[in-house]
Image (tube, rainbow, N blue to C red):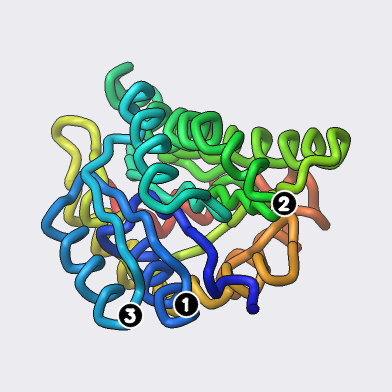
Amino acid sequence: MSEFEGRVVVITGAASGIGRALAVDLAGRGAALALSDVDTVGLAETARLASSLGAEVKSDHLDVTQREAVYAYADAVVARFGKVNQLYNNAGIAYHGEFERSEFKDIEQIVDVDFWGVVNGTKAFLPHLIASGDGHLINVSSLFGLLGIPGQTAYNAAKFAVRGFTESLRQEMLIAKHPVRVTCVHPGGIKTAIARNAAVPDGDDQQSFAQFFDSKLARTTPEAAAKTILRGVRKNRPRVLIGADAKLLDGWVRIVGPSYQRVVATVAGRIMPKN
């Protein structure tokens, strides 16, 4: 049996992008899938694609910020499949805006989905991952969980938090000798709709930011991202970097240290769209 064949896999944010690509790839590898998202239309298409490959699929609307709903969902998944082997905390949203012009509601929404969504999912499913005897937890952070970027204070905060949370939890699993491996994923620019759906402060030009991201930063397809993630899961890597941009910038920050911030601020001030 492969790392994925016969495993029960939970994927949040499965309606599009990396989540959909993971679902389709895993369906082809023989996994049973529990898929969720707030986008029920996109989720239905993902479920159809996975089912067409022969996978057993449970598909549910789920808001990962609603803690009680996440716990109920975990119970429902176990009731359906009898176990959970892998959890991909992938659900996330984006926001672009300088902190000075951002409202608390904008910051809180990003943190609620991108950080607390990961915590909620992990807390609800961790006992089941342990009980499976061969669990694997995969939390999706970002390249922006490795370095700070102007206009991304809220997103940086959430994704750095996911990184710290995941790395600490991996160590706790090792100390406790629980049968749960833990991986943190850091995608660079991925060709998804996340930038087109990103929120911005009132009065800012959301379209310009989306066009800039899609044309200048998004270089890796969701399908390539999914294959990289699954390769990292198979090899039990603690950290998975996706895309040449993530690998290059991570290495650069390690080499130059905090001085990277002045360089990024200078470059960003020249090339990022002005609102």
In-image side of 256 versus 160 (left or right) = right
Residue 24, picture quadrant: bottom left
Q: Residue at x 45, y 65 (%)?
A: 189
Q: Which mark is residue 30?
A: 1
Say few, some or many: other residues with alpha carbon within 10 Å of mark 2 (under 14 / 14 to 19 / 20 or more): many
Please tell me whether residue 94 is drawn above or below residue 216 in the rendered image.
above
Please tell me whether residue 70 is drawn above or below residue 6 in the rendered image.
above
Label 2, on which residue? 181
Q: Position of residue 157 (x, y in %)?
A: 52, 32
Q: Position of residue 55 (x, y in %)?
A: 35, 73
Please tell me whether residue 160 is drawn above or below residue 249 in the rendered image.
above
Q: How many marks?
A: 3
Q: Which mark is residue 84?
A: none
Residue 245, picture quadrant: bottom right
Q: Residue at x 58, y 56 (%)?
A: 186
- The residues tagged by marks 2 and 1 sit, at their Cα atoms, a distance apart of 20 Å
Label 3, on which residue? 54
